[in-house]
DNA sequence: CAATAGATCATCT
DNA sequence: GATGATCTATTGC
């Protein structure tokens, strides 16, 4: 599979975000992350689907149960990775939002693969179309090899980073309820790049 | 195509 | 001991 950008091209077309980028409420950050690029090592993809998880009032959020060993990073400063293990086999990546003491975060749910696509195919043992390579929270962490080893890492620099296109892509944002939860299941906190082929199912 | 079952374990009760 | 911010394969129409 051909990459959309080489590593060098992607670096040129984007710029790293500052840590302040993340210092806003989870809903705003969830919208702002759409169209940005998630980079881990030689692999990268455009974020096309996100979900906001709020604080104590949001019973679907892990943070609603308060500060535990697992949720510790959510209560700290923004711009950190909250990676957790679920269903005995999947890792999910969240971006910590807001400010210390406000445990909002954004779940990254789907990527449009850009760079290192052949490597992603191998890691996922995937045979299908590119659009199915990273279109789900567990799929994209496997494709970019993101695990709990990245728990707490800052995302403005280092191996795992968020970058912005210098020329912002044009798209419309769709809003729907969040996927796969039972509590607060009708809250409109899922944000998608409308019409993008790489959305989750 | 839609619905369902099964995998599998960290976390919290 | 039950649950869960999922994915894949399989079954059935």
Image (cartoon, coloured by chain):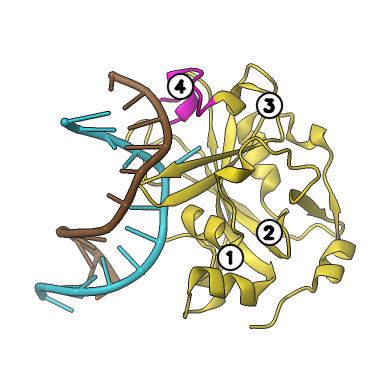
Chain colours: A yellow, B brown, C cyan
**Discs 2 and 3 lie in a common subunit:** yes
Instruction: Kindly identify which numbered label has been placed on residue A187.
Output: none
For the residues bearing labels 4 and 2, Cβ distance under 8 angstroms: no
**Disc 1 marks which residue?**
A196
For the residues bearing labels 1 and 2, Cβ distance under 8 angstroms: yes
Q: Secondary structure at mark 1?
A: loop
Q: Residues within 10 Å of mark 3 (few under 14, many from 20)?
A: many
Q: Does B6 sit left or right of A2 as displayed?
A: left
Sequence order check, earlier mark of 1 and 3: 3
Instruction: Kindly identify which numbered label has been placed on residue A98.
Output: 3
- Most common SS among magenta residues: loop
**Disc 2 marks which residue?**
A171
Residue lying at 55% horizontally and 37% vertically, measured from the top left:
A52
Instruction: Give the number of the mark in front: 4 or 1.
Output: 4
For the residues bearing labels 2 and 3, Cβ distance under 8 angstroms: no
Sequence order check, earlier mark of 4 and 1: 4
**Discs 4 and 3 lie in a common subunit:** yes
């Amino acid at each position: 599979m051909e990459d959309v950008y080489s590593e060098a091209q992607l670096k040129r077309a984007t710029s790293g975000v500052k840590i302040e980028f993340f210092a806003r409420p989870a809903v705003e950050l969830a919208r702002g992350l759409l169209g940005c690029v998630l980079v881990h090592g030689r692999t990268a993809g455009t974020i096309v689907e996100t979900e906001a998880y709020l604080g104590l009032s949001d019973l679907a959020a892990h943070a609603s149960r308060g500060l535990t060993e697992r949720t510790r990073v959510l209560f700290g400063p923004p711009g950190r990775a909250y990676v957790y293990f679920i269903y005995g086999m999947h890792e999910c990546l969240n971006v910590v939002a807001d400010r210390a003491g406000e445990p909002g975060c954004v779940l990254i749910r789907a990527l449009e693969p850009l760079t290192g696509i052949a490597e992603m195919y191998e890691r996922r043992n995937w045979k299908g179309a590119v659009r199915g390579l990273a279109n789900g929270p567990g799929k994209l962490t496997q494709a970019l090899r993101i695990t709990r080893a990245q728990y707490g890492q800052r995302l403005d620099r280092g191996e795992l980073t968020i970058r912005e296109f210098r020329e912002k892509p044009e798209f419309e944002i769709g809003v729907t309820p969040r996927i796969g939860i039972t509590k607060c299941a009708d809250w409109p906190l899922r944000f998608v790049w409308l019409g993008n082929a790489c959305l989750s199912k």
